[in-house]
Amino acid sequence: MVQNVATHMPELEPADFHLLSGLEHGMRFSEWVATGKIPEFSRLDDEEVDYRIDRCMDQGLIERKTIQYTGYRLTFEGYDALALHTFAERDTVDGVGAPLGVGKESDVYEARSFEPLALKYHREGYTNFREVQKEREYTAEKAHRSWLYTARKAAEREYEALEALYPAVSVPKPVDQNRHAVVMAKVDGVELSRVELDSGQVVGVLDLVLAEMAAAHRAGYVHADMSEYNVFVASDGVTVFDWPQSVTVEHTNAGELLERDVENVLGYFERKYPQETPAVDTSTIAGAMTGDGFESVDECSG
Ligand SMILES: Nc1ncnc2c1ncn2[C@@H]1O[C@H](COP(=O)(O)OP(=O)(O)OP(=O)(O)O)[C@@H](O)[C@H]1O
Ligand SMILES: [Mg+2]
């Protein structure tokens, strides 16, 4: 598991960040940045580079490898530190707290500012990258950009969607984005997967989830990863989160992805609440979302 880099932040000095951003820059050209190139990229002298390398190695922010030459690269923690440093400079984040969710594709932490925030570091591409690297060195060299680049693209896509959707759709309020990280409002609630709805609430909650999907479609987006794990339920409504894989309604597969999203949500309700969930057709619901508008499952049933 990746460490919460926030604990290292108070010890890091400006020159440490020069080293980290120097490596970030160098990693655009090769996966492992040759030691001799680091002074130029980081604008630190040789002696300073050696000192900063030791410090950053100790903190797990960079790693070393010797193949034909000795080189260094950022770890995810190092990349996290750069993003967090930027958020601190912009006064977006004052402090980072406990994990809110740790997954294969992201690490989400509680963060503080004038309001409770969630800080999501994207990890897309990292696992794949490791596998590639095991296979063959030169493939890894070719794919060297994958994790920095893939994770950053995911964060950018997620932020873009949140900005387009908020507040018309109930999504976490977007606050800031840098590198592979997104800062958004912290949402209170419980994941749909962990909620036990009373029989009288089932249709109401299903309607709320589908209504948010319909609103997202009106605003130009299909989530494309809808599931009981990406919806929070609270007493005042539902919030749909986790938008990095969303597509715009112009996307070639938007229709199919919308149907799959509807199917995922209906399927979950049918399995978990077979008695209460009305028999409805996926394509009828998806059709309502793209056509005249979705009102309620009851209107789409029978
Ligand atoms: N804005 C938020 N407020 C509170 N908790 C959040 C917020 N965003 C995410 N979380 C928590 O973090 C967990 C992971 O977040 P999210 O679903 O966005 O990423 P993920 O599931 O790792 O991404 P992916 O589906 O791409 O693997 C969520 O299940 C949720 O518990
Ligand atoms: Mg998720």
Image (cartoon, grey):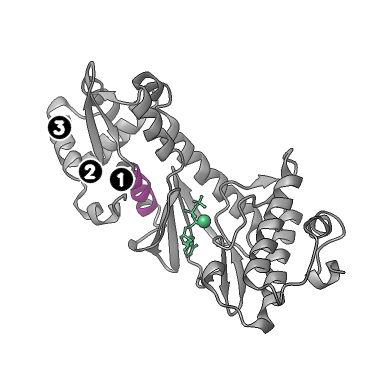
Residue at image location 39% in from the left, 33% down from the top: 131
Q: Amino acid at mark 3?
A: Glu
Q: Are marks 2 and 1 in contact (CB under 8 Å)?
A: yes
Kindly identify which residue carries mark 3.
48
In this picture, residue 256 sits left or right of residue 49 = right
Q: Is residue 301 above or below residue 252?
A: below
Q: Residue furthest top?
A: 68
Q: Is residue 52 magenta?
A: no
Above/below status of 293 relative to 224: below
- Asked whether mark 2 and ligand 1 are closer than 8 Å, the reply comes as no
> Is disc 1 surrounded by few (<14), some (14 to 19) or many (20+) residues within 10 Å?
many
Disc marking residue 60 = 2
Task: Give the magenta part as a residue range.
Answer: 79-88
Q: Is residue 285 left or right of residue 93?
A: right
User: For the point 59% across and 66% down, which residue is it?
Assistant: 239
Q: CA distance from mark 3 to mark 1?
A: 21 Å
Give the amino acid type for the residue marked by disc 1 in the picture.
Glu
The three-letter amino acid code for the residue at tag 2 is Gly
Question: In the image, which disc is placed on residue 18?
Answer: none
Residue appearing at x 44%, y 64% in the figure = 117
User: Which tag is nearer the camera, tag 3 or tag 2?
Assistant: 2
Q: Earlier in the sequence, mark 3 or mark 1?
A: 3
Picture quadrant where residue 49 is located:
top left
Identify the element where label 1 is drawn. helix
Query: Are the residues at dot 3 and dot 2 in contact (C-beta closer than 8 Å)?
Result: no
Quadrant in the rendering for residue 116: bottom left
